[in-house]
Image: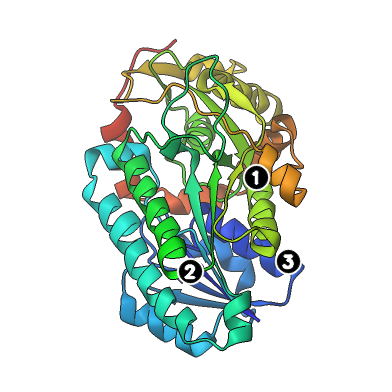
Amino acid sequence: MTILVTGGAGFIGSNFVLDCLSESDETIINLDQLTYAGNLQNLASLEGDVRHIFVRGDIGDSALVAGLLMKYQPRAIVNFAAESHVDRSIHGPGEFIQTNIVGTFNLLEAVRAYWGALDTTAKTGFRFLHVSTDEVYGSLGKTDPAFTETHRYEPNSPYSASKAASDHLVRAYHHTYGLPVLTTNCSNNYGPYHFPEKLIPLMIVNAQAGKPLPVYGDGQQIRDWLYVKDHCSAIRRVLEAGQLGEVYNIGGWNEKPNLDIVHTVCALLDELKPRADGRPYKEQIAYVTDRPGHDRRYAIDAHKIERQLGWKPMETFETGIRKTVQWYLDNPQWVANVQSGGYRDWVAKQYGTGPKA
């Protein structure tokens, strides 16, 4: 039995691959283009493991994907491949359109041809699971109910608009062609192997380097935080028992303002690796100009997946964030290796400098 995972060298994808192979002997074909956020070091522990077959390539390369499907005959595809950083989508939306929309379309076309040629038994058991985001639903007011699976799509950034388009394509291929699809929309993930452009790893890395901790606007943007390994277990459960054509929202039940997240990270670093001068890390917080169109609040209602599939997160935010901070402290070489010159230039361009709090 074989699964094709796209984007399996990225943050969530690599955690999914590692978790799957720790619990199963099923072969995983890992297709990743290795853009800046794809990192084979995430998968270093699998070196020599015959169950993991890595292929560098683009989901938009129809011939490559068709060849992989024909050669390995996977029973399922889990599609993580995506450009996923809102700030980058504001500065350069073209890559997001190409990967998230055109790439997903080409992948679906290759999968449709493969699935259509399967025998009846294989065809019945096949699944295409598309991993998406809560950002497709837009922004919530402070007292609005959390996003459910039937919430209207109202994407506000080029990133979320491109993911919304990919979600619609997946839905259309189910309703038009009968492709056996499943879609998951998750809240903000955090945990090991997270590229340090996102909030939590950026705070950890900058704090250790003595750099400012950039906080957009007033820091009161609210997100629902989901530990990445909980997300991976939810995906496995949806793949195992989800109803075809259905959408499942996956969240951690942890709504917190960004500023609270930064303060929590600072407090953990004060405890686990204090500054040499004994001063608190929160003194490094620097407020910077808010990004254009910044959504104020996301919140996931994850009752459906709990009710129908019996899944709920294992980690609280308190346990998950402690594990995350400790992982970054324990893996300085991984951090150093992903901080290329291009990465440093990006952070400087995006955040600049601002007055300390």
Distance (Cα) linking label 3 and label 1: 18 Å
Disc ID at residue 178: 2
Disc ID at residue 340: none
Type of residue at label 2?
Gly
| Label 1 sits on residue | 327
Q: Please state the horizontal and vertical placement of residue 71, each as a whole percent of the image.
A: 48, 89
Q: How crowded is mark 1: few (under 14 residues within 10 Å), some or many (20 or more)?
A: some
What's the residue at 61%, 43% (across, down)?
250
Q: Earlier in the sequence, mark 3 or mark 1?
A: 3
Q: Which of marks 2 and 3 is nearer the N terminus?
A: 3
Side of 48 where 171 appears, left or right:
left
Quadrant where the C terminus sits is top left
* SS category of the residue bearing label 2: loop
Viewer-side label of 1, 2: 2
Distance (Cα) linking label 2 and label 3: 33 Å
Vertical comparison of 326 with 145: above or below: below
| Label 3 sits on residue | 22
What's the residue at 34%, 45% (across, down)?
343
Side of 78 where 35 appears, left or right:
left
